[in-house]
């Protein structure tokens, strides 16, 4: 189960999540997750994983490929309450050392605050067609 690390904010959890992803660090990755039985993770093109053991196993398999990822984050759209935060963002993921292999992902991360600080309860990433990125970053016009 997760370590005793305390995250003071949802932003701290998110920073640790992407650090663990780039370092392929399974122990750091799993410290950010809640101990709740209903945590959920959906990887691009993958099935819905519920609970700590299947989520840990999925991350272990990803990290065991030996590929290291580089992550570039677009600005976050956040909806927050005192005890929960939802982050929605576009993430550009590439394999370290290559410039021609990258994938834009639409990501939703949900964090909750509990007795042990902030933790992730949902991570959902989906592939975004490159042509859709221009509409994601277009200025919003209100009528």
Image (spheres, helix red, strand yellow):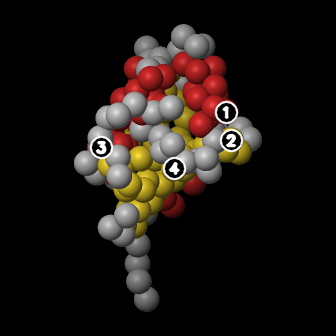
Q: In terms of depth relative to the viewer, which is nearer, 88 or 30?
A: 30
Q: Earlier in the sequence, mark 3 or mark 2?
A: 3
Nearer to us in this view, 122 or 140:
122
Residue farthest bottom in this picture: 143
**Spatial separation of the CA atoms under disc 1 and disc 4:** 14 Å
**Which residue sits furthest right?**
47
Residue beneath disc 2: 49
Per the image, label 4 sits on a secondary structure element best described as strand
- Residue linked to disc 3: 7
**Sequence-earlier tag: 3 or 4:** 3
Identify the residue position indicated by label 4 in the image. Answer: 121
* Image: 71 above or below 68: below
Residue at 36%, 69% in the rendered image: 81
- Do callouts 1 and 4 mark residues in contact (Cβ within 8 Å)? no
Q: Which mark is residue 54?
A: 1
Instruction: Estimate the spatial distance between the alpha carbons at disc 2 and disc 4, rounded to whole Å.
Output: 12 Å
Quadrant of res 96 = top left
Q: Earlier in the sequence, mark 3 or mark 1?
A: 3
Q: Residue lying furthest top in this view? A: 66
The answer to whether 29 is drawn above or below residue 74 in the figure is above
């Amino acid at each position: 189960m997760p370590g005793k690390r305390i995250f003071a904010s949802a932003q701290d959890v998110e920073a640790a999540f992407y650090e663990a992803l780039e370092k392929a660090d399974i122990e750091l990755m799993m410290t950010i997750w809640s101990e709740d039985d209903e945590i959920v993770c959906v990887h691009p093109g993958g099935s819905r994983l519920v609970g700590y053991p299947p989520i840990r196993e999925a991350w272990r398999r990803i990290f065991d490929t030996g590929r290291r990822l580089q992550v570039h984050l677009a600005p976050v759209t956040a909806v927050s309450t005192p005890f929960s935060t939802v982050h929605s963002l576009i993430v550009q993921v590439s394999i370290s050392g290559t410039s021609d292999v990258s994938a834009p992902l639409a990501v939703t991360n949900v964090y909750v605050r509990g007795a042990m600080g902030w933790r992730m309860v949902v991570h959902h990433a989906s592939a975004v067609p490159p042509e859709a990125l221009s509409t994601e970053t277009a200025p919003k016009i209100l009528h």
